[in-house]
Image (cartoon, rainbow, N blue to C red):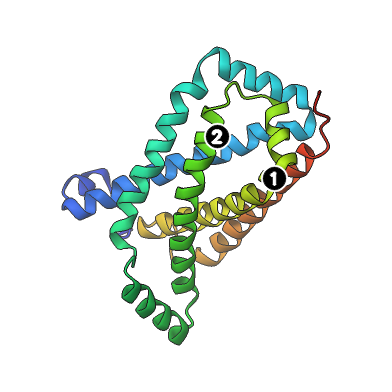
Amino acid sequence: MESFVTLKSLGKTTLPGRLDVMQALSGVVLAVFTIIHLILTSTVIISPRLMGGIGWILEELYLAQVFGPIILLLVIFHFILAARKMPFLTGGLKVYWEHAKSMRHQYTWEWFAQVISAIIVLVFSIIHMSEILSTLPITVEKSALREQHGWTPFYIVLLTAVGIHLSLGLFRVCVKYGYITAENRAVWQKRIYILLAAYIGLGLLTIIRFHFITIPN
């Protein structure tokens, strides 16, 4: 199918095209990391001891210390690449908002949601990673303490923004590179919405579980 991008054609792209590929690849890597991160954290629902054991492994292997900063740098790198297409200026935002209202097109609003969620994810990720890396090691008690002492609204906003950006981003990448076509678009849209609901739902259950963990004095 002509819409598919081959490795050969990627090698012949211009600089903007290569930046698009780098943006897509970094986004997919971050999406996979984010899903794995949520799954590992959500093990607290099954057993706090299970999550504690995972945290111990991360600490013993220095994975949090090594990959934490790398992931944060990748988030910033991905945002810089994506920022090339964002209407940051007030005038640009106003024009885009007016176009979105007049067109009333689903994909236009989804792109706008992706831009807003990207900004939220960038700022909140920096705060989140700074908090985590400055209070190592990762333990169930520390995570529960944050949720029980005012961080819940922060994490609900971050969870929602990440879920929206992740699901819309994966969908747009698959459309851009031909994996989602006009024939299967409707099916994949439903799957993306299911992914979004599952991601946010699992995240909310995890947050709620932290509120029921007893923290030793």
Residue lying at 31% horizontally and 62% vertically, measured from the top left: 85
Residue lying at 57% horizontally and 52% vertically, measured from the top left: 163
Per the image, the residue denoted by label 1 is 150
What is the CA distance from the residue labelled 2 to the residue labelled 1?
A: 14 Å
Of residues 193 and 85, which is closer to you in this image? 85
Of residues 55 and 149, which is closer to you in this image? 149
Image position, residue 7 (x, y; %): 26, 43
Residue ranking furthest to the bottom: 102
Q: Identify whether 199 is placed above or below 35.
A: below
For mark 2, give the secondary structure. Answer: helix
Checking the image for residue 131, the label placed there is 2
Quadrant showing the C terminus: top right
Residue lying at 57% horizontally and 40% vertically, measured from the top left: 35
Of residues 6 and 170, which is closer to you in this image? 170
For mark 1, give the secondary structure. Answer: helix
Mark 2 or 1 closer to N-term? 2
Image position, residue 4 (x, y; %): 33, 55
Q: Amino acid at mark 2?
A: Glu
Image position, residue 185 (x, y; %): 50, 65
Q: Amino acid at mark 1?
A: Gly
